[in-house]
Amino acid sequence: MAARKPKVIVTRKLPDLVETRMRELFDTELNIDDVAMNREALIAAVGRADVLAPTITDRIDAELIAAAGDQLKLIANFGAGVDHIDVAAANARGIVVTNTPGVLTEDTADLCMTLILSVARRVVEGANLVQAGDFRGWAPMNMLGRRIFGKRLGIVGMGRIGQALAKRARAFGLQVHYHNRKPVSPRIADELSATYWESLDQMLARVDIVSVNCPHTPATYHLLSGRRLKLMQPHAILINTARGEIVDEAALAELLAEGAVAGAGLDVYEFEPAINPKLLGLPNAVLLPHMSSATIEARVDMGEKVIVNIKTWMDGHRPPDRVFAGML
Ligand code: 8YV
């Protein structure tokens, strides 16, 4: 007799290709209408699923994990960041947690670069001006931004995405500086001509552009605190495509409004999807709706990773993208 297929509950709508394959391989429950699951629905899901495939919009905290049935064995996250999952609580109950690293690196780095250029060159302001019918012809002093060529970029977190951004930045003539828990290998540092700063404070005070590219963990919560943001030079800009919680959003909004920080490009927010109202309407803030990895290719690749993680677990092997609380 064929072995029972595991019950997999997918919390959000995924690309058709991914959903179809999941239905072929597993006893899969989809969320075709893409209605985000409320707490009740999530509790019901962990009560009967062998595998939960959540996304960043699901809060998988210790309380939810405690409410799970003994059959729940795997949380196969659709996404790289796992800060919405209490990995320690899951592991303590013998539940394996996996993620989808690597496949959204290039798209996220592309969007970091887009934000750097958009803020420095006032692209959104210019586009809005034209769409509003306010273009009155060229003038020498119109829409002046800041050159990025030859400037210094400070990358906070030199993992996969930080390094992919550094490669792009080099091609745009930026000098790469970075702060990380430890320096990258001499070969990578050489390839990127990257300067390491053990002290984040010192780096912040010296660079023209700061890009946040580290994961959100208890250690990085408000890493860019009000005190640290004030260390930035008044002409400097801040880019965040990682997690909103890493930056003190209220402090940033104040500093942008005062002109103490020249501009910001944000794709993520501290209380997402809520955005500090002080940020809305600021001409020097380019605000995007958490879309750094939003390409169809990334979503399909992420789905394939979720499938491989479930399939290897189902076949009795170690899933390739296992995450442990200690490694965050
Ligand atoms: C994902 C992200 O799209 O993967 C991540 O960590 O931040 C996003 O780009 C999202 O998390 C999907 O769950």
Image: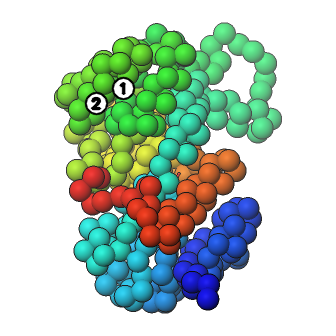
Q: CA distance from mark 2 to mark 1?
A: 7 Å
Residue at 63% x, 21% y is 143
Of mark 2 and mark 1, the one earlier in the sequence is 1
Lateral position of residue 3 relative to residue 46, left or right? right
Report the amino acid beneath label 1: Gly
Where is residue 91, by image quadrant? Answer: bottom left
Q: For disc 1, does the CB lie below 8 Å from ligand 1? A: no
Q: Which percent across, then down, holds residue 135? A: 77, 27
Q: Is residue 135 visible?
A: yes
For numbered disc 1, what is the local secondary structure?
strand
Lateral position of residue 57 relative to residue 251, left or right? right
Residue 154 circle label:
1
Q: Which percent across, then down, holds residue 282? A: 52, 42
- How many other residues sit within 10 Å of disc 1, few (<14), some (14-19) or many (≥20)? many
Residue under label 2, please give it. Answer: 179
Residue at 35% x, 18% y is 187
Looking at the rendered image, the quarter that the N terminus falls into is: bottom right
Report the amino acid beneath label 2: His
Depth check, mark 2 against mark 1: the one in front is: 2
Lateral position of residue 284 relative to residue 82, left or right? right
For numbered disc 2, what is the local secondary structure?
strand
Q: Which percent across, then down, holds residue 179? A: 28, 30
Residue at 49% x, 30% y is 164
Residues marked 2 and 1 touching at CB (< 8 Å): yes
Q: Is residue 231 visible?
A: no
Residue at 28% x, 78% y is 93
